[in-house]
Image: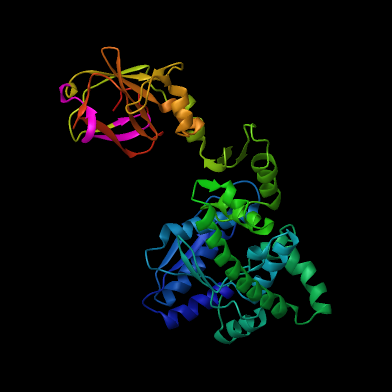
Amino acid sequence: MDSMLLLHLMSVLFPHQTRAIYVDHQLQNMSVAWGQLVQQQAAALNLPCILQKVSVATGNLEQQARQARYQAYRQHLQPGEILVLAHHQQDQAETLLLRLLSGAGVNGLAAMQQLDIREDMTIWRPFLQLSRAQIEQWAAQLGLDYVTDPTNHDTHYDRAWCREQLWPVLESRFPKMQAAIARSSMLMQDAASILNEVLQQDWRHCATEHELDLTRLGQLSSARQRQLLSDWIKGREQYRPSYDMVQRLQNEVILAKPDAQASLHIHPYYYVRYQKKLYRLSREVLYAERLVHIEEVVFQHYQLQQSIRVASGEFRIINQEVGLSASLLGQELKLLRRRGGEKIHLYGRVGHWPLKKAVQEAQILPWLRHTIQILVVDNVMLGVFSPKGFWLAQSEYVVQGGWQPSLISDCIFHRSFSNGE
């Protein structure tokens, strides 16, 4: 009823800008017939209509159906378009109540916004301040044809249970509770907006998308730490992690002993602490040493301005104040995979010292160290490719105005480097 009323009003207000989409979850025997009714009503209003079937994954049916529905919306939304939904005041109050019972925080209790601007879409809910009684009266005056989904009365589902059983009990005691709860959601939206301003300050102070400074995090209050961690774990996902998961990250990783190899898997990422920072890593990055094959020996030929890709990233061959002799350009050079125990005489430093020590001093992250390769000609070490750049070694090939590989971008793990491309 509310969706059909919205369809009619949009045809009046925006007759040349409105398209209808009917999402068929294929969960009801009558779902195809309902789609035909929507299509007929849209045709009568001269509106284009899309019938989109979706498959609902197993698990929480209400949540999975919602995800499938929004994925269908994203599929058909064009840049600059707005998704208009018919959620009303009772929907808002039910959402807040159900989230309260699930232990949601301020953001969850803010429920639905009338104008919801997201990264991937903008949603407008023009009925959010209208009661169901007002919508019923309006639909009756217009004589709208609509169907009622029987699952709306199936108390197996949380929202239907709330509407059918809990709602009448509460409303008998608090007749104006629907408007009161909806008003609470608006107040929560104000609070959430203020908290978000603080959160954005903390983001800028402590975090990037995949890295969090634990020293700076520790300067915040406990409440702000939890809020930042929750939002940081959420990343680009729609929902924040549970309170328990945030607590686990704090207790098992952040507060673990300094010498512990602390990590926590929160799908799909791994959260790993190294020194005073917390990292969010994909499985491909954390286990790249197992997943990406790097040859023991790779033969390469270099030319000036050439871009080369090695295990530790992409480099360009350029002239610098000090570098390698031009006589090496075009020659066959060897890239050796680091095996352990190597020593290097870094240009500008006194004496040889273990490559391992240079790696530690450069604070190269443990899960990236397997990408280190050594550039050699005639058993003479020319330098080392690392995720932090190329380290020039002292040798008879070092000259003024010579060439060096210059780092362009960090490690690329989605392909094999066995051919040294």
**Residue 240 visible, this orientation:** no
Q: Is residue 380 left or right of residue 103?
A: left
- From the top left corner, tell me how far across and down residue 286 is, in percent: 51, 33
Answer whether residue 189 is visible to the viewer in this image.
yes
Q: Residue furthest front?
A: 350
In this view of the protein, which residue sits in the foreground, 75 or 410? 410
Residue depicted at x 46% and y 17%? 340
- Give the answer, above or below, for where 74 lies relative to 409: below
239 versus 160 height, above or below: above
In x, y percent, where is residue 221?
66, 58
Direction bottom: furthest residue: 141
Residue 316 lies in magenta, yes or no?
yes
- Residue 39 is left or right of residue 253, and the answer is left
Quarter of the image for residue 222 reads bottom right
Q: Is residue 133 left or right of residue 65?
A: right
- Point 57% across, 71% down: residue: 113
Q: How many marks?
A: 0
Return the x and y of residue 153 as percentages of the image width and height: 71, 65
Q: Quadrant of residue 220?
A: bottom right
**x and y percent of residue 68 in the render?**
54, 54
Quadrant including the C terminus: top left
Predominant SS along the magenta part? strand
Query: What residue sits 65% from the left and 63% below the top?
Result: 108
- Quadrant in which the N terminus appears: bottom right
Residue 136 among those drawn in magenta: no
- The image's colour scheme reads rainbow
- Residue interval drawn in magenta: 309-327
Query: Which of 104 and 171 lies nearest the eye of the viewer?
Result: 104
Q: Nearer the viewer, residue 276 or 166?
A: 276
